[in-house]
Image (tube, coloured by chain):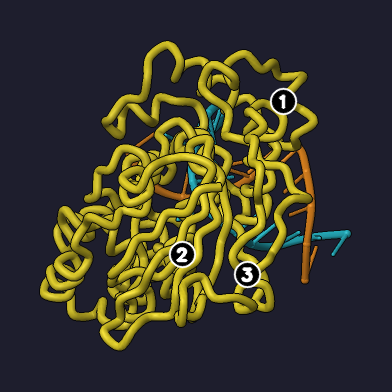
Chain colours: A yellow, B cyan, C orange
Amino acid sequence: MERIIIRDINNFKLSHTLECGQCFRWKQLSDEAYTRGLPLEGVAAEETYYGVVKGNICVATATTPDDKGFITLVLDVTGGDKDFWQDYFDLDTDYGEIKRVLLTNEPKLEDAIESGYGIRILNQDIFETLISFIISQNNNIARISKCIESLARSFGNRIEADELTTHCGCKLEGQEFYSFPSPQQLASVTAEEMNPLKLGYRSAYVCAAASRFLEDGLPESEEGLISYLGVGPKVANCIKLFGLKQMDSFPIDVWVKRIMNDMYGFAENDTKGMQSYAAEKFGRYGGYAQQYLFHYYRNTK
DNA sequence: TCGCAGGTGGTCG
DNA sequence: CGACCACCTGCG
């Protein structure tokens, strides 16, 4: 494992970023594990997560904020340089500016933005995003994670790591880590091989999507994405936002429906109305607004 | 047991 | 078009 240290980060909190529903392969270390040691001299750890990103294992520890709210990110990784991880965590984007614009356009976002202040929209792999959000439909987070982990263990590559002991002495050696399958790997899987993974009826969608992605790549338009079997408006917007970096995308799920009903009185089936209202109100920052709102309602209501 | 979980495809009227 | 409704699976 190699250590990468990124200092002086503001508007960032790991748990907000990794638990707002955009990614499914990160896990938190227990409290007693991550508070046991110091990642840096004289600075305490606040939280530690570990996960797999584009074939690299990463153990990420955030320090407690200093008096100006800046934190340091300590990454123990099996690959990827500093630029890679800086990009993955979206650390070059000015979230202060995003928040200012959103708040100016919609002061009602204040509580949501304050509550989810540390959210960053990760720069994730397109194919993994496509498959992950196909699996997410009519499903819960715990099982989505389980399905994706099964896909990786069954069809991805085992990632070699010589030393998996973190700064806090927490051993990850008992665990094995696998990359998310490549389009080639997944496209060659048969329905019979996919069955034991318990993806349910999504299994066929995943097989078909992998083959089609391998041949055609991913369309960037909503209509193009929806032509994939198992991709409807909600999943298409997630793929646009998290995979294709179309930051105006505003995925509308059950939580956002509740929010739009609660804040603006939209009927819960009026997704078209919500969509156009979000476009008008949040504009090119719709995706960020959605993340703040989603995180806020999921964690407080 | 049954409804629900960050929905979607198919089938009606 | 828009309004239903079944759907794999696991958990409370």
Q: Nearer the viewer, residue A153 or A206?
A: A153
Asked if residue A239 is positioned above or below residue A261 in the image, the reply reads above
Name the secondary structure under disc 3.
loop
Q: Is residue A127 left or right of residue A158?
A: left
Chain for numbered disc 1: A
Residue at left offset 66%, top offset 57%? A165
Report the residue marked by disc 1: A194
On the image, the x and y values in percent for residue A198 come to 75, 37
Asked if residue A186 is positioned above or below residue A178 in the image, the reply reads above
On the image, the x and y values in percent for residue A256 come to 40, 63
The tag earlier along the polypeptide, 1 or 2, is 1
Q: Which three-letter amino acid code belongs to the residue tagged 3?
A: Cys
Report the residue marked by disc 2: A255
Q: Which three-letter amino acid code belongs to the residue tagged 1?
A: Met
Q: Badge 3: how crowded within 10 Å, few (<14), some, or many (20+)?
A: some
Q: Which three-letter amino acid code belongs to the residue tagged 2?
A: Trp
Name the secondary structure under disc 1.
helix
Q: Quadrant of residue B2?
A: bottom right
Q: Is residue A81 left or right of residue A277?
A: right
Q: Nearer the viewer, residue A41 or A145?
A: A41
Give the Cα distance between marks 1 and 2: 30 Å
The tag earlier along the polypeptide, 2 or 3, is 3
Q: Nearer the viewer, residue A76 or A137?
A: A76
Q: Quadrant of residue A216?
A: top left
Asked if residue B4 is positioned above or below residue A200 in the image, the reply reads below
On the image, the x and y values in percent for residue A60 come to 50, 60
Report the residue marked by disc 3: A168
User: Residue A204 — which label?
Assistant: none
Mark 3 vs mark 1: give the one in front. 3
